[in-house]
Amino acid sequence: MAAPMSAAAKSDSNSDKQTLLAVLQFLRKNNLKETEALLKQEAQIKDEDVKPQSSTQGESDVSHALAAYKSENDPTLYEDFYIDLKNFIESCLDVHKVELSMILYPVFVHMYLELVFNEHEKQAIHFFEKFSKDQEEYYKEDLKKLSTVTKKEHMQGNLLMENFKSSKFVIKMSRDSYNHVKRHLQEKHMKMLLTIIQEHLFIDVFDGVPRNKEQIVACSGGMLGEALREANKSKVYYGLLKEPDMSIPIEEDEDAGDEDKPKKKKAKKDPLLMKKAKNDPNAPAVTRVPLPELKDQDKIEKITAFREANKRVKVGPDALPSICFYTFLNSYQGVTAVEVSDDSSLLGAGFADSYIRVWSTSPNKLRGIKKNSELQLIDKEADDVLERMMDDKSGSDCKTLVGHSGPVYSICFSHDRNYLISCSQDSSIRLWSLKTWSNLVCYKGHNFPVWSVRFSPHGHYFASAGQDKTARLWATDHHQPLRIFAGHLSDVDSVLFHPNSNYVATGSSDRTVRLWDVLNGECVRVMTGHKGTVHTLCFSPDGKYLASAGRDKVILLWDLSSGVMVAQFVSHADTVYSLCFSRGGGVLASGGLDSTVKLWDMNLVLTEMDTDGDASIPSSLIVNNNPKLLIGSYRTKNTPVLNLHFTRRNLLLACGPYVPS
């Protein structure tokens, strides 16, 4: 029997692993198209950190991490010290009271954990019951999980416990408030409280006036407090990539009914397309991330999109968009995911019975490939060879894709509508051909259910997010992930590519939103403010803003250039599951479990936005929550809204299953 590994050997092993990982990341940073061996090796190294360790090593690591909680303090003093801290904060001036009260929750948690670790079970339970009711409402769910930890042996494996012992709770506080509480603790000789604050809290001190209640509440709610200001200092290239030069033939006005009326001779200019045609100083270099070359079919698609944009209806408070609702009736299988293709010609849905169904929303039927014997007769040199391969006899309004072995949680069409990507409870991601209507690849990398999957706007790449606390970047021609985005403290529930394909946004059950750089896998933005799981994300068409929403029923709008919250949209009565910007970006649509579609005025947000605020001084920022931002609310009879989509002409499509009452 082999002798157990010594602590020094374990340390050396971990050090070697980190060194190897750093080398691989350096090679990856300088060449995105590395060999498959490197990709596989890096994934294996990172997966080792995600997978559970052996029981002996796990217990040793937990014991070492929990050593900080070892204390010989009198267990009866904890209650007295907490009450003293609470009374001190209550006696402070209002200008300091709000900021200092943020200390109470993390101090309460760590005091409780100290009591549990030192086996003062009776005092710990009494302490929890007495003070847990005083904590903020948005921490109630975390406290419910913490209440299950009443013995030392319970501390291993508890998610909240693991996060609190491995990371510091972050609190932003003005220098005056910080000096105020520090002086009090030193004068009162409260060594226990000082030790907890120094070892388990990270107080991000800023120069400026203290924040008010609204500013603090807006940014609070994260599992481990707020985001550090340093976390949002990186440069983000949020601009749109320059479109390739293409000669777009001028189209005659097909909508003109009177032959005597003059024809259109010049196409209208679309502001968004004009911006994409120019060199944007905030845009990344076209070669920053390798993107697939445009095919002839892609160019035709862009020309079609440009023509559609010329006929786009401008929407806003004075011209609300029309809404078309697709309702799934008799969906006894349980609709778990809905998606509409970019050109609005395809509608797909995933079901709890593991099936995926795709419908055509246009008069065109969904066709398959001809039989092999018929394909042999086709002229392979013909210009329309692909069209000749399609079998008109097999055309139908709906196609079914079978392959997953669990509920399908997310689906996404590729931009060219040739492929569909899906993820499931079975921990797999599947790539489907919409020509042959068959499964091409099964990607396995996540260790637990995969909640969300999205294609890159430029194709080739896709991103996934799952219960294993990671998001991953994939390429359709690699069976291993190119990047593993690790940093969230709980499930990653939603993922979305930036319009320029250089960044990936994620929303998590740890109540934070993060932005990751595709080039090097680094987290460049951490945004806190949600009070519940983040289920949906949406970038504005110009790439500058990110909207997020979820279980807390509130929609938050973030400025990616600084990572600062710009606005809050409050009106929904239940979880928000879908967000979508109009094609021009003037209207934001939202929908969720309250069976309601709501429209929000983005132009008013931008008009009232505080442009003088300094992102380095939290108290100088203003969050817009003007009730006038809501410009429309439309309720269905009993249909939760699972997906929203603006067509290229700004017709709003909404989808959801009818739920009998």
Image (cartoon, grey):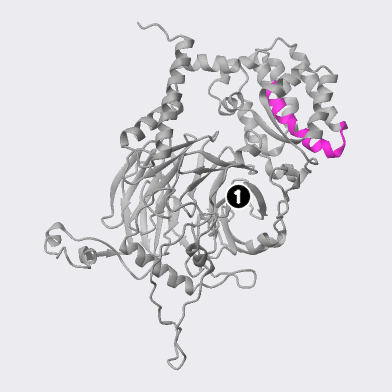
**Residue sitting farthest toward the bottom:** 260
Rendered view: 262 above or below 232 = below
Dominant secondary structure, magenta: helix
**Rendering coords of residue 487 (x, y %):** 53, 34
Given residues 517 and 61, the one toward you in this image is 517
Whether the magenta-drawn stretch holds residue 390 is answered as no
**Rendering coords of residue 472 (x, y %):** 43, 40
**Which residue is tagged 1?**
561
**Residue 319 visible at all:** yes
Residue 127 picture quarter: top right
- The residue range painted magenta reads 91-111
**Rendering coords of residue 285 (x, y %):** 46, 52
Q: Residue at x 54, y 46 (%)?
A: 535
Whether the magenta-drawn stretch holds residue 94 is answered as yes
Residue 626 picture quarter: bottom right
**Residue 601 visible at all:** no
Q: Residue at x 74, y 13 (%)?
A: 75
Given residues 560 and 225, the one toward you in this image is 560
Given residues 373 and 607, the one toward you in this image is 607
Q: Is residue 608 left or right of residue 161?
A: right
Residue type indicated by callout 1: Ser
Q: Residue at x 47, y 91 (%)?
A: 261
**Rendering coords of residue 297 (x, y %):** 32, 63
Which element carries disc 1, helix, strand or loop? loop
Quadrant (top left/top right/bottom left/bottom right) for the N terminus: top left
Rendered view: 173 above or below 455 = above
